[in-house]
């Protein structure tokens, strides 16, 4: 056995002769700190973390059982392996020592060979545990890194698809990026206020926000003559325009058929399929009402309508931020979820600020 000063052993015993004998045996191979009491041990480990503690049980003041209970209850010391070294030799004493969290139980007087072999065995186990933990940590990091790469690629593809929709619908000018910002602000406030907390606590915000970009993806299947008509749509044209909701759901379901995307496409389908439903059941495509409408759709409905109101369209002028907020609030209980409107009323100034900040963005320049 070679001397290893990297492995530090604390030996705690109130019996001076046992303490010196133990130190003499161990210091041939390890860095050893011999301490006369548990109280002194706790002062010591604030400065040096040992690889192993050899702890006597019967000591004046704090005994070994009390000391190991404190060690195992402290997150800084709980993982330090402890071996009881004691003159108690009954089976019940050994069981009690192990049940307190000790990894072994050595009776005194001990033989040098037995003491060293048991310590070496336990240090080898601890070393193997540390190596396995390091391997697991590294493996987890590799998996997380790969997941971030996949999510980054997925998000880039989704953003590109969403921008293609905007390029075709050249009247909306960065509507998608603004609605994403509105949703983020509203969800944060809902969480803060405890509104729909039971549902929101299950949401993974990264894919929620990213998937919201697909709420109008079905417009990519709508004819340019309708999508970019310089005027109000006829009834027949509007009925065709309304089909963008189901076309969007169909497109997302097609994506789902290619593999597992976790909750991402479930969120996307909820946004795409329900953001034109209305609280009173008068919306489309199904006529869902109240909480039959997914929460994603109810939140998007407010964000979507607000942004449409403040934007210029071929058939209307842009409403002011104040007018848009008033229309949203007046739609409470009819078009919109009253609880969400209550939160929106607190945030109308934030929505206006988001709209101002993202008024001129790369999408607008590219479309122009």
Image: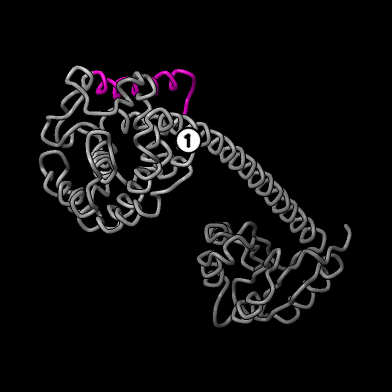
Q: Is residue 272 shown left or right of residue 365?
A: left
Compared to 54, does 192 lie above or below? above
Please state, as top left, top right, bottom left or bottom right, where the C terminus lies in the image.
Answer: top left
Q: Residue at x 65, y 74 (%)?
A: 45
Residue nearer the viewer, 1 or 224: 224
Residue nearer the viewer, 92 or 122: 122
Q: Is residue 331 shown left or right of residue 174?
A: left
Residue nearer the viewer, 243 or 146: 243
Q: Is residue 163 shown left or right of residue 341?
A: right
Q: How is the image coloured?
A: one colour
Of all residues, the one furthest to the right in this rendering is 2
Residue 123 lies in quadrant: bottom right
Compared to 301, does 62 lie above or below? below
Residue nearer the viewer, 4 or 224: 224
Compared to 358, does 107 lie above or below? below
Q: Is residue 139 shown left or right of residue 225?
A: right
Q: Residue at x 25, y 30 (%)?
A: 274
Q: Which residue is mark 1?
A: 159
Residue 260 pos. (x, y %): 47, 25
Please state, as top left, top right, bottom left or bottom right, where the N terminus lies in the image.
Answer: bottom right
Q: Residues within 10 Å of mark 1 (few under 14, many from 20)?
A: some
> Which SS type dominates the magenta stretch?
helix
Q: Residue at x 32, y 30 (%)?
A: 272
On whether residue 344 falls in the magenta region, the answer is no
Residue 43 pos. (x, y %): 62, 80
On whether residue 255 falls in the magenta region, the answer is yes
Q: In this picture, which residue range is highlighted in magenta?
A: 240-261
């Amino acid at each position: 056995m070679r001397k290893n000063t990297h492995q530090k052993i604390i030996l705690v015993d109130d019996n001076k002769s046992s303490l010196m004998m133990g130190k003499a045996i161990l210091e041939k191979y390890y860095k050893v700190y011999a301490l006369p009491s548990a109280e002194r041990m706790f002062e010591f480990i604030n400065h040096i973390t040992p690889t192993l503690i050899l702890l006597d049980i019967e000591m004046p003041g704090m005994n070994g059982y009390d000391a190991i209970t404190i060690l195992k209850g402290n997150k800084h010391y709980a993982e330090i392996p402890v071996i009881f070294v004691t003159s108690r030799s009954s089976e019940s004493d050994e069981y009690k020592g192990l049940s307190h969290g000790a990894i072994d139980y050595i009776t005194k007087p001990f033989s040098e060979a037995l003491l060293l072999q048991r310590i070496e065995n336990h240090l080898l186990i601890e070393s193997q545990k540390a190596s396995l933990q390091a391997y697991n940590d590294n493996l987890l990091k590799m998996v997380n890194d790969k997941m971030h790469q996949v999510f980054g690629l997925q998000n880039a593809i989704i953003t590109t698809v969403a921008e293609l929709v905007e390029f075709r619908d050249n009247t909306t000018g960065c509507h998608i990026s603004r609605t994403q910002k509105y949703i983020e602000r509203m969800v944060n406030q809902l969480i803060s206020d405890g509104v729909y907390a039971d549902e929101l606590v299950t949401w993974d915000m990264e894919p929620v926000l990213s998937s919201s970009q697909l709420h109008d993806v079905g417009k990519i299947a709508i004819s340019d003559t309708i999508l970019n008509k310089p005027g109000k749509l006829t009834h027949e044209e509007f009925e065709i325009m309304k089909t963008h909701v189901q076309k969007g759901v169909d497109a997302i379901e097609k994506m789902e058929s290619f593999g597992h995307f976790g909750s991402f496409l479930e969120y996307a389908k909820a946004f795409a399929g329900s953001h034109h439903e209305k609280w009173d059941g008068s919306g489309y495509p199904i006529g869902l009402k109240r909480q039959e409408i997914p929460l994603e759709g109810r939140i998007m409905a407010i964000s979507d309508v607000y942004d449409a109101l403040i934007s210029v369209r071929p058939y209307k002028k842009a409403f002011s931020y104040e007018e848009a907020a008033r229309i949203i609030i007046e739609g409470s209980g009819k078009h919109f979820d009253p609880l969400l409107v209550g939160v929106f009323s607190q945030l109308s100034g934030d929505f206006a600020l988001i709209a101002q900040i993202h008024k001129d963005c790369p999408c607008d320049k590219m479309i122009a």
